[in-house]
Image (cartoon, rainbow, N blue to C red):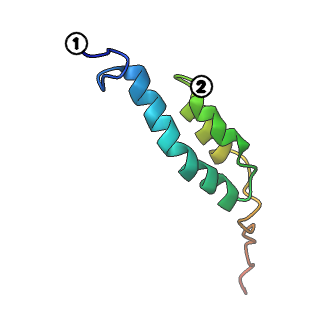
Amino acid sequence: MTCPVLSLANPYLLYWLFAVFSLLPLWRLFRRAGLKPYPALTVFIPLLGFAVALSCLGFPRWPAVPVKVKKKGKR
């Protein structure tokens, strides 16, 4: 008799494993973008965690990336 909690067919176990293994890459991605890495911990919120983490990464301005200035061409 197997334990249903440890079965790989358990969606909660798969979600937590995916969250644990994606935490370090997200943490490093936040740091390389010049943002605080703590929003990467939101991946542990079920159903909305990844959307919140990626929106925290995607919408603000990244301090590590310089702002592009358009050069005026000669006329």
Q: From what the image shows, is residue 11 above or below residue 33?
A: above
- The residue sitting at 58% across, 34% down in the picture is 43
2 vs 1, front mark: 1
Residue 50 point in image, percent of width and height: 55, 34
Number of callouts: 2
- The residue sitting at 43% across, 21% down in the picture is 12
Instruction: Give left or right: position of 73 versus 46.
Output: right
Instruction: Say what amino acid the circle numbered 2 marks.
Output: Ile
The image quadrant of residue 17 is top left
- Identify the secondary structure beneath mark 2: loop
Q: From what the image shows, is residue 21 above or below residue 52?
A: below
Instruction: Give left or right: position of 59 versus 16.
Output: right
Instruction: Give left or right: position of 36 versus 27.
Output: right
Question: How far apart, in angstroms, are the residues tagged by discs 2 and 1?
Answer: 31 Å
Q: From what the image shows, is residue 17 above or below residue 59?
A: above
Sort mark 1 into few (<14), some (14-19) or many (20+) by Cα contacts within 10 Å. Answer: few
Question: In the depicted view, which residue is nearer to us: 53 or 1?
Answer: 1
Residue 40 point in image, percent of width and height: 64, 41
Q: Name the residue under label 2.
A: 45
Question: In the depicted view, which residue is nearer to us: 10 or 70?
Answer: 10
**Label disc, if present, on residue 65 of the rendered structure:** none
Instruction: Give left or right: position of 1 versus 72.
Output: left
**On-image quarter of the C terminus:** bottom right
**On-image quarter of the N terminus:** top left
Q: From what the image shows, is residue 51 above or below residue 3?
A: below
Residue 72 point in image, percent of width and height: 75, 79
- The residue sitting at 56% across, 50% down in the picture is 24
Question: In the depicted view, which residue is nearer to us: 21 or 53?
Answer: 21
Instruction: Say what amino acid the circle numbered 1 marks.
Output: Met
